[in-house]
Amino acid sequence: MTYGEKLLHYKKIIDAGLDEYTRFPPKRQDRLFGAMRYSLMAGGKRIRPILTLEFARLCGGAENTAVPAACAIEMMHTFSLIHDDLPCMDNDDMRRGRKSCHRQFDESTALLAGDALEMYPFQILTDSISHGVSAENTLKMVRLLAEYAGHMGMIGGQQIDIQFEGVCSEEKELTEMYRLKTSRLLQAAACMGCLSAGAGEDKIGIAFEYGDKLGLAFQITDDILDVCGDSQELGKPVGSDMENNKKTFVSLLGIKAAKERAKQLTQQALDLAEGFTDCGFLKELTLELLNRNK
């Protein structure tokens, strides 16, 4: 398969899994189910679940074994987007090219939809056992996702992000915040792929480092796009970082230096990808994320 064909193949697997996991029988909380599906099935790049499936493949695992983990990581990511958009956070009206969840439904429903998509991944991860993953590795994935998405990971990073609003932060502090806010979930995606395939600590260690470098490069590129991007292509407003007085690599270093830093981190991720055989797809994906316009 070409890179484009494989990307489409992975997205179809992920979308089918997400669709199946969110086809709930009619209940009084149907509005909640609708809000969950509205945000979850809105498309997006699906980078995190694609990484899960690809790292499982790189470690010799069958696609089917990593599907629960891939769906779990995308749900966790979607939860973060719903809550990010809320009036008490970034107060964004658009997400993935259409109304954000609280604009399409209401603020209370969006809050609960995010809550539900934060909890459901742990239930889904237990399905990994029936997909051929050992009970030990399934438990490791549950712990990993809880840690990397929670107060010591993504959510903790978001709290630091709020505290940095209007504050002149140092590059070291900003890097650590990005590491928690963005890298941790990408690290979880890559490492859960390895665990789904029963990989050893050496491969998991490479995946962990790769996710770190990719996440930092990804977030810096987001900073650049928030200044230079097109809201139609991005599917969300631009200029929100400046509007919310957030410190970013662009405001700290300037556009040129931020682009150079993203390029350096991407190269480090590419070097780490070489730790796996047949890593062509992973390297192309890594480069695409650096050069994206949305």
Image (cartoon, rainbow, N blue to C red):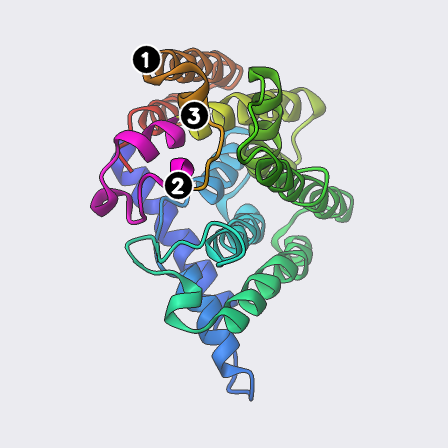
Q: Amino acid at mark 3?
A: Ile
Q: Is residue 92 left or right of residue 68?
A: left
Query: How many numbered tags mark residues here?
Result: 3
| 228 part of magenta stretch | yes
Give the residue at x 58% y 49%. 69
| 76 part of magenta stretch | no
Front one among 119 and 59: 119
Q: Is residue 217 left or right of residue 151?
A: left
Real-space CA distance between mark 3 and mark 1, rounded to the nearest whole angstrom: 12 Å
- In the picture of the structure, the residue carrying the numbered disc 2 is 243
Residue 1 visible within the image = no
Which region of the structure is painted magenta? 221-243
In the image, is residue 87 above or below residue 35?
above
Of helix, strand and loop, which mostly describes the magenta segment?
helix
Q: Which disc, if any, is residue 220? A: 3
In the image, is residue 83 above or below residue 238?
below
